[in-house]
Amino acid sequence: MKDWFIAGVAALGVTLTGAATEAKPLDEILTDGVIRIGINPNFPNMSTRNDAGEWEGFDIEIGTMIAEQLGVDVEWVPTETAQRVPFLVSDRIDVSMGALTRNSERAKLIDYTVPLHTEVLAVLATDEIEGESWEDFNVEGVTLANMRGNWTVGWIEENMPNVELELVDSIADTVRLVAQDRADAIVENIDFFMGFTENHPDVNWRVVSEPIFVAYCALGVAQGNDNLVEVLNIILYDLHNSGTVSSVWEENYGAPMLREVTASPWF
């Protein structure tokens, strides 16, 4: 297993042998009238506070729709990236959002719904640099912009050893580096970056057509909470089938998902 992936799993903060607290079942959530949804507090445009201190973003809109379908209120629980799985295991939240990618290590600890959205690891560049595959950018003289602490930094160091890395602290700063010709491209989950390109309308942006890989992000639920998973799957199917998920995504990110989730009734 790759070192960068092992580090990501270790960041979950729990072990495979750790004991889990019994999760709140669906009937208890309905009786209490509240569903606790974990959201990443530092992840625009998934979830962030506006000037009035209110939560807004893709996860907030979708989470609100889910609560309305269940007939309950929402308690938003700020859940940092590394806390998403531990908060489920310890019954501090009922559902985890925040772009929770499905992988086999997490699946040993939690259950997943059907996918909510995708993350496409790809290359965002301008028309000033050529290349039709990510491998075309792995050459001397190319500088990639990224953020400090991102797992993709390790992936780039392992898989693109010929490039230089310029690291900043935010998605907006990363896009700005390329717009100002201080970097040539970004290798990241590009869906989350597209909205920030609108800050630089004079730049001719392009996404390299061949993705590196496509990951599927779902809602996380505590293991064994089968009835909750079943109901959430039905709600997500309806939201996908109506085009609501795609519409909400584009409203928040300024562009369609690079790879949309196809609604399927089989789950």
Image: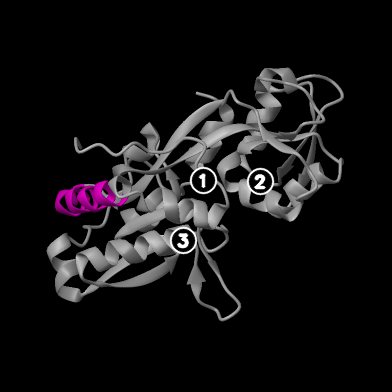
Q: Identify the residue under disc 2.
A: 149
Residue occupying the point 57% across, 25% down: 212
265 on left or right of 6 = left
Kind of residue sitting beneath label 3: Thr
Residue denoted by label 3: 79
Identify which residue is drawn at 72% across, 18% down: 136
Quarter of the image where one finds residue 90: bottom left
How is the protein colored in the picture? one colour
- Determine crowd level at label 3: few under 14, some 14-19, many 20+ residues with C-alpha closer than 10 A: many
Which residue is labeled 1 in the image? 11
Specify which label sits upstream in the sequence, 3 or 1. Answer: 1
Secondary structure of the residue carrying numbered label 2: loop
Give the CA separation, mark 3 to mark 1: 13 Å
Mark 1 Cα-neighbour bin, 10 Å: few <14, some 14–19, many ≥20:
few
Give the magenta-colored segment's residue range. Answer: 224-239
Q: Is residue 85 visible?
A: no
Distance CA(mark 1)–CA(mark 2): 11 Å
Q: Quadrant of the C terminus?
A: top left
- The tag earlier along the polypeptide, 1 or 2, is 1
Name the foreground residue: 169 vs 83. 169
Farthest bottom residue? 52
Tell me the mark number nearer the camera, choosing from 1 and 2: 2
Magenta span: predominant SS is helix
